[in-house]
């Protein structure tokens, strides 16, 4: 297994809380688990450290803790970059992108109280990744994907079921705005969506505290 594959696998496990915030990542144990020497694991962990998925404490690596300060900082950036990204996605979206957007809308409409948090968040991930991809700007896509993933760790940490109505309200409004090519509506919906995400995360933190 090469360092990139190890990096991707560990990152997904950190995002989806299979590796809990604050957990120590043991180099020897990881090398054994991936059936490689310690060198590829070290390379993977160094890249994760550069992207702030892990932090180094002495000779150990630890999964980054969940901090509200990071979420606030990311929100400020999203309010500038993601709103514009949604506008570009509206103008540049491909035929395949439109089809996937409609499919996402149908899937969300079919959710009910039995839908698990992880499934809801996975759909939100898919929705955002689609929008970022349809900007046709790979640099922006990669940057926004990395920032947004820090949000999902907070959602997954929630001890309570996600409220479907409030969670997807702005999403559905944004989809409709993109479909109608209404730039003003897209900006308003994307701004509202980002702000409500922060409010929800603050609520999760208060409940968990």
Image: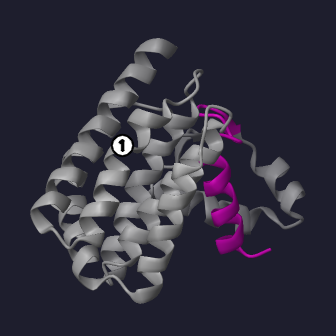
- Position of residue 146 measured from the top left corner of the image (x, y, whole percent): 43, 59
Q: Identify the magenta region.
A: 1-24
In the image, taking residue 174 as reference, residue 45 lies left or right, namely right
Magenta stretch contains residue 20: yes
72 in relation to 29, above or below: above
In this orientation, does residue 60 appear? Answer: no
Q: Quadrant of residue 120?
A: top right
Q: Quadrant of the N terminus?
A: bottom right
The percent coordinates of residue 91 (x first, y second) are: 22, 81
Residue on which the image places disc 1:
169
Q: Which residue is located at x 66 percent, y 37 percent?
A: 116
The residue at 63%/66% (across/down) is 43
The image quarter containing residue 51 is bottom left
In the image, residue 151 sits, relative to residue 179, either above or below, namely above
| 188, 176: nearer the viewer | 176
The number of numbered badges drawn on the structure is 1
Secondary structure state at the residue bearing disc 1: helix
On the image, which quarter does residue 46 sit in?
A: bottom right
At 49% from the left and 30% from the top, the residue drawn is 163
Tell me, yes or no, whether the highlighted magenta stretch contains residue 4.
yes
Q: Residues within 10 Å of mark 1 (few under 14, many from 20)?
A: some
- Considering depth in this image, is 160 or 95 the residue closer to the camera? 95
**Image location (x, y in percent) of residue 85:** 24, 68
Q: Is residue 81 visible?
A: yes
**Image position, residue 71 (x, y; %):** 33, 38
């Amino acid at each position: 297994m090469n360092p990139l594959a190890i990096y991707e696998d560990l990152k997904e496990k950190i995002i989806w809380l299979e590796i809990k915030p604050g957990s120590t990542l043991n180099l020897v144990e990881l090398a054994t688990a991936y059936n490689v020497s310690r060198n590829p694991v070290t390379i993977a962990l160094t890249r994760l450290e550069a992207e702030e998925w892990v932090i180094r404490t002495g000779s150990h690596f630890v999964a980054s803790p969940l901090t509200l300060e990071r979420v606030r900082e990311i929100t400020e950036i999203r309010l500038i970059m993601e709103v514009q990204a949604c506008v570009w996605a509206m103008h540049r979206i491909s035929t395949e992108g439109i089809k996937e957007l409609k499919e996402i809308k149908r899937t969300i409409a079919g959710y009910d109280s039995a839908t698990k948090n992880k499934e809801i968040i996975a759909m939100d991930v898919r929705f955002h990744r689609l929008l970022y991809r349809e900007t046709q700007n790979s640099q922006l896509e990669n940057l926004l994907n990395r920032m947004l993933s820090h949000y999902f760790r907070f959602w997954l940490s929630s001890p309570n079921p996600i409220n479907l109505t409030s969670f997807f309200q702005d999403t559905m409004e944004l989809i409709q705005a993109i479909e109608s090519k209404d730039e003003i509506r897209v900006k308003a919906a994307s701004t509202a969506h980002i702000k409500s995400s922060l409010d929800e995360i603050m609520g999760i933190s208060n409940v968990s505290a």
